[in-house]
Image (cartoon, rainbow, N blue to C red):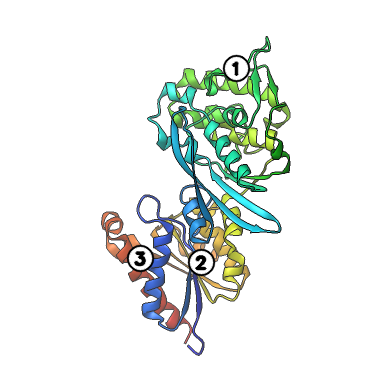
Amino acid sequence: MSTPPRIVVAPDSFKGTVPAREVAERVRRGLLRALPGAEVVALPVADGGEGTLEALAAGGAALQDAEVSGPLGRPVRARWARTGDGAGGATAYVESAQAAGLALLDPGPATALAATTRGVGELVLAALDAGCTALVLGLGGTSTTDGGAGLARALGARLLDADGHEVREEGGGALHRVAAVDRAGLHPRLAGLTVTVACDVDNPLLGEHGAAAVFAPQKGAGPDEVRRLEEGLRAWSTALAPDLVDRPGAGAAGGLAFAAAALLGARSASGAELVMDLLGLDEAVRGAHLVVVGEGSLDAQSLRGKAPLAVAARARSAGAVVAAVAGRVALDEAALRAAGIERALSLVDAAGSAGRASADGPTLLEQQGEALGRWWRERTP
């Protein structure tokens, strides 16, 4: 090779095994063993869900700690990320699962009715108090089906019954009593906040494809709870914003996306695209010869807007060659080529079994990084 290559390693996490930051670093080390003169930049990414805060921190964002209400009201320690402080102001990234995640409780019928997004609203307030003027709200992994009512309460709204009395009970199980929403007490600085939700589903709020029917059973709800939650979401939406119930994605995170649109004027965007913008991916891949993507399983789901394919598209637009390292590769050559990936290496194939690939993941990542470096050296004499 006449010129040392510039390589960007931009993988998502290998969920449950290796975080994105370590994946990027291990592959970087392997590449440098084969290409000692190369410039190799590690830039871990995420798709807006699990691992996003860590990816943003690796990209220079400042992580902030806060004590907020958990999904059942007990205090939990949560984090959010702050990026930028220039003329355009700072942007906050709030991951809803930090305050209302399914992992924060033992799901069952009672929790499906009681779980609240109040803590998510408290994280939004923390971002406002820190002077942020833009907010990205990540919606994955919540335990809630309260239509964002907890968020609304935390931000200063009052939920009223037909007699004008305040409905204080948290969770989607009490929403059937809501007849009106008093917005007079909403935090005054919300009017100056630009909000985007990272949303990769298109479910409406109500009906057979809505928040209760599709997602509540995954959060512990049985048939009776699903019916009660559906009734509650219908009453809540009629009181708050009936024109938004059929909006694609309104049912995300148990209807949290609906409340964000109704109260905050939130727009929806792909989680992977949002995170790439926050990380400055376009600038990172400009002038790169090779971009390496990756995730635990490179499969048909990856083709539906997940981080590796989103990175690959931007890298190809910048003129870079794209390769991948994954725990397993379940796409054939034609599908990989159509996605713009010229070479894909699998840890499972290298290890001989999924068990060994999981146990020896970090070592195998370095080995596969080195193999990619040898491939690049042979491909580019």
To which quarter of the image does residue 206 belong? top right
Q: Residues within 10 Å of mark 1 (few under 14, many from 20)?
A: some
* Front position in the image: 263 or 12: 263
At x 47%, y 20%, the residue is 223
Circle 3 residue: 365
Residue type, label 1:
Val
Indicate whether 257 appears above or below 93.
above
Which circle's residue, 3 or 1, is located before the other in the chain? 1
Residue type, label 2:
Ile
Residue type, label 3:
Leu
In the picture provided, is 303 more to the left or to the right than 187? left
Residue 140 coordinates in the image, percent (x, y): 51, 42
Circle on res. 341: 2
At x 57%, y 52%, the residue is 82
Residue 120 coordinates in the image, percent (x, y): 55, 36
Indicate whether 109 appears above or below 70.
above
Marks 3/1 in contact by CB < 8 Å: the verdict is no
* Front position in the image: 301 or 295: 295
In the picture provided, is 36 more to the left or to the right than 168? left
Which circle's residue, 3 or 2, is located before the other in the chain? 2
At x 55%, y 64%, the residue is 312
Q: CA distance from mark 2 to mark 1?
A: 53 Å
Q: CA distance from mark 3 to mark 1?
A: 53 Å
* Front position in the image: 102 or 199: 102
Q: Secondary structure at mark 3?
A: helix
Q: Secondary structure at mark 2?
A: loop
Circle on res. 167: 1
Q: Residue furthest bottom?
A: 2
